Image (cartoon, coloured by chain):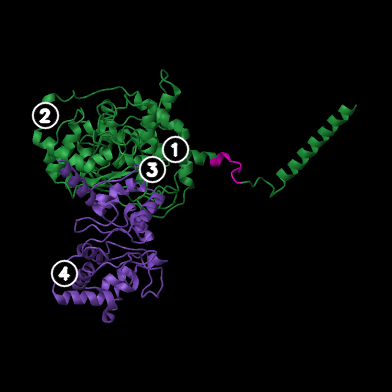
Amino acid sequence: MRRGTRNLLLAALAVVLVLVGGFFYFMPGYLPTEPGKVAVSATTQTITKGEYLARAGDCIACHTEPGGKQFSGGRAMATPFGNLYVPNVTPDDETGIGRWTADDFYRMMHQGISRDGTLMYPVMPFASYTKVTREDSDAIYAYMMSVPPVSQKNRPHELKFPFNQRDLLIGWRALYFKQGEYVDDKAKSAQWNRGAYLVEGLGHCAMCHTAINKLGGSKTSQEFEGGMIPNQNWYAPSLTSNREAGLGNWSLKEITDLLQAGISDRATVYGPMAEVVYNSLQYLSDADVEAMAVYLKELPQRDTEPPPPSSARLVSPGVMELGRKIYAKQCSMCHGEEGKGHAPQFPPLASNQSITMSSPVNSIRMVLNGGYAPGTKRNPKPHGMPPFSHILNDDEVAAVVTYIRVAWENSGTPVTAANVSELRTLVPE
Amino acid sequence: MLLLVIAGAASAQQDPAIPAFKSVDSMEARVQGCVTCHGQSGQGTSNQYFPRIAGKPAAYLYNQLVAFRDGKRVYPPMNYLVAYLPDSYLREIAEHFAKERPAFEPKQPATTPESVISRGATIAVAGDASKQIPACITCHGPGLTGMEPGIPGLVGLRSSYIVAQLTRWRTGNRQAAQPDCMKRIADRLSESDVHAVATWLATQDPPRDASPASSNLQRMPLSCGSQM
């Protein structure tokens, strides 16, 4: 009996609590106000997802001028065919994409055709974005519509004849553009497929890591085999060669560190890749970065050239000695006497693929202009390398770069003063 | 041989342009990217252009780093180096060099005619009322060590650097926060004034205390965006 009464009381108490709770819940002004406990609507969820995907696509890097208003365009893209000016993609009705529909946006992403029907120049990576799903495209669209509109007219492109004739793009598209969303490879894991979707689609990694020919196209058969980035004068290393930036011998942690933090025990990102990490990759989730790492590590290895024969690696003793002396004086403090570095802050040079790969462009540039790794969430206060262009002459730079390419059993080849001189005249960017 | 090694080590320590630090995880190690041009403590190097940055007000140095990163101040080697560094880190770098008080380099011997030097001295210390040019020391401090928070010290800078900066201001290449007081002054200087005042400034003895003057102790002759 006593027990029954207690149960009854408890039940009554529960009813009262529910009623009181319901009263406070439904009463206007009594909705939860605790910070961080705001109910997230479906719309907000889509926008947040779109923002994340726009980060993965690195839209901001091209569509925002340094120090300019977000997504308002205007940034000049120097190409071998002349300057292109990136358009305003804020939702401004007159000067931006305010009147675009989700269908317009998807057609642009998927087919490279603008709202007014004009064919887009492939500087917009629609050849990669075509792989993005309709759902993801809609989320990015929702996010783009949510950013502040900026009234800023697009600047006309300054392309040389005949590249200013958009009809020619029909030919380009026939040669180099294959339309189609990403299709899962059933033989691979979900993680691998997620990585492939990000690398081949939004990440548009092939834009730099696949060589671009005279027509501004890149061949699928040479995908990720590396190449010079036009007009930026950096070499984007091959992702399919373990002698370059192939990641076959890397641990997953080393890959995710490099992509997300910008530094790793093996190497550090500088130049255009630092920009990608700074604007895009540092914001991706651990799961997505790991998926990309899994995919990149498993890229089939295709070495296009045989390793350099020992005759190509011969260095005159005088050059070697000059290089060694400069190294001991200027470089060994950070990179260590044996080139082991202080990873991850100061990258090792011994057994570093980016030092020994066939193109010496990046190493020469680093010695001339120095560089800072990007400041990221995981590495907010990066270490940096000073410029030496005002201290070392062409022969000295050539000697020290030659030294680090062949010392400590590194398998690189010597570089010449002419290689250095060519890069010295270029303004660092 | 041992003597040679010791002598080598000693001279390596003396050259502020050569990378050196004690611990990898320190600001000292992090700013090695600056040392071949600005010296280990920001004192400058034997290079005749690169400026001394040590002891300049932190907010001034921070404004410059942000302007370099965002392309508002154009100097490609600097624009490139700081392109991907976040605000918080640039502030820390600025504070690091603002705190440094390294010794000054021996001043440049004057090789210019006395008339040029005296014109420079007049502009710097008294100004030129006829051209509405205020004296440099009014804003850059009685010891030319700058003023908190945003006005740089001028002592210890080479004439080539000062000439280049004033010329960039005159042509609109270099700008400061609006209202840009330095732009208004630079516009009133003739080319020979620029040369004269830069020459005089570069031949001044450093003060005993190189710290910047306190913020806005006296009334400024022009309104400056960097002091607001």
Which chain did the renderer colour purple? B
In the picture of the structure, the residue carrying the numbered disc 3 is: A279
Asked if labels 3 and 1 share a chain, the reply is yes
Disc ID at residue A137: none
Q: Is residue A284 above or below residue B6?
A: above
The residue at the far top in this view is A187
Principal secondary structure, stretch drawn in magenta = loop
- Magenta stretch: give its range: A35-44
Residue at horizontal 41 percent and vertical 55 percent from the top:
A151
Give me the C-alpha separation between circle 3 and circle 4. Answer: 49 Å
Relative to residue A322, is residue B121 depicted above or below? below
- Residue type, mark 4 in image: Ala
Residue B193 screen position, x and y as percent: 21, 73
User: Can you tell which quarter of the image residue A197 is in?
Assistant: top left
Local secondary structure at mark 3: helix
Q: Quadrant of residue A313?
A: top left
Which residue is labeled 4 in the image? B110
Q: Position of residue A381 (x, y in %)?
A: 38, 45
**Marks 3 and 2, Cα distance to the nearest angstrom?**
41 Å
> Horizontally, is B105 left or right of A9 in the view?
left
**Disc number lying in front (3 or 2):** 2
Q: Quadrant of the N terminus of chain A?
A: top right
Q: Secondary structure at mark 1?
A: helix
Q: Both on one chain, marks 1 and 4?
A: no
Packing grade of label 1 (10 A; few <14, some 14-19, many >=20) is many
Q: Work out how far the residue at label 4 is from the one at label 2, CA to CA, in angstroms.
A: 52 Å
Q: Say whether marks 3 and 4 touch (CB < 8 Å).
A: no
Q: Secondary structure at mark 4?
A: loop
Q: CA distance from mark 2 to mark 1?
A: 49 Å
Q: Which residue was labeled with disc 1?
A: A53
Q: Mark 3 and mark 1: span between their CA atoms?
A: 12 Å
Q: Residue at 19% of width from left, 24% of height from top? A: A305
